[in-house]
Amino acid sequence: MRIWAIANQKGGVGKTTSALCLARCLADLGQRVLLVDLDPHGSLSRAFGIAAEPPPQGTFDLFNGESIARVARATGQADIQLVAAQAAMATLERRSATQPGLGLALHRALIGADGDHDFALLDCPPTLSLLLVNALAACDRLLVPTQTDPLALHGLEGMLRTAAMVERSRGRALLRQILPTLYDRRTRTSS
Ligand SMILES: Nc1ncnc2c1ncn2[C@@H]1O[C@H](COP(=O)(O)OP(=O)(O)O)[C@@H](O)[C@H]1O
Ligand SMILES: [Mg+2]
């Protein structure tokens, strides 16, 4: 299974939209895709009509040792499964102080699901958090959607610094690709 994280520490750059589009394109090519919603806001889960209440099974459960096979759900789209966001994910930050090894929880869960999916796409939150570190520790490719205006590019530097830091600590190469989004050639700031 190939694992791609879609991340940028800036919000509103098109991470979730890119994850959705990539999932659809890969599924159309006959690939079995697993989407993992790592953003406590749950935009990706909402896109599939999954409500925040009652709390669905999903990403938080992976941090309690649950397997992907048990919490992944059908999406109504052939070949795309989803691990939904849960509001409780926001409490993980506190737990990480007392629970060593939590940074690799997603990595362990994905190893357990190898063979069930061809691709895992990790839709990340817009913050430097335990959830983002989990995605960077687990993935083999990092896609960084970014708008092309100067302020957005400043945010990009922060993301690439974080990626370099995680790459050093995990001791395994992390391929990075920048994905320009929301380009509007009518504006000067875009170019
Ligand atoms: N290529 C695009 N063209 C037009 N609007 C887009 C495009 N990509 C994303 N958007 C819109 O931009 C907003 C932010 O996108 P989203 O994917 O939620 O960003 P993020 O996940 O980085 O916060 C959404 O309203 C989305 O519909
Ligand atoms: Mg998003």
Image (spheres, rainbow, N blue to C red):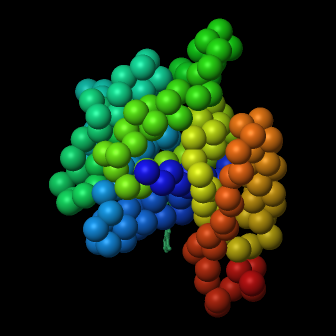
Residue 22 on image: x %, y % = 43, 66
Residue 165 on image: x %, y % = 80, 42
Q: Nearer the viewer, residue 174 or 188?
A: 174
Residue 90 on image: x %, y % = 53, 27
Q: Is 63 rendered above or below residue 128? A: above
Residue located at (71% from left, 51% from top): 173
Residue 28 found in image quarter: bottom left
Residue 138 found in image quarter: top right
Residue 107 on image: x %, y % = 53, 35
**Apparent side of residue 52 relative to residue 99 in the rendered image (left or right):** left
Residue 25 found in image quarter: bottom left
How many numbered dots are placed on residues in this image?
0
Residue located at (29% from left, 49% from top): 81
The answer to whether residue 71 is seen in the rendering is yes
Position of the C terminus by quadrant = bottom right
Q: Is 63 rendered above or below residue 47? A: above
Q: Is 33 rendered above or below residue 166? A: below
**Apparent side of residue 130 relative to residue 42 in the rendered image (left or right):** right
Q: Nearer the viewer, residue 13 or 72?
A: 72
Q: Is 64 rendered above or below residue 174? A: above
Kindly give the residue lying farthest to the bottom in the view shown.
186
The answer to whether residue 45 is seen in the rendering is no
Residue located at (39% from left, 49% from top): 35
**Apparent side of residue 55 relative to residue 36 in the rendered image (left or right):** left
Kindly give the residue lying farthest to the top in the view shown.
98
Kindly give the residue lying farthest to the front in the view shown.
115
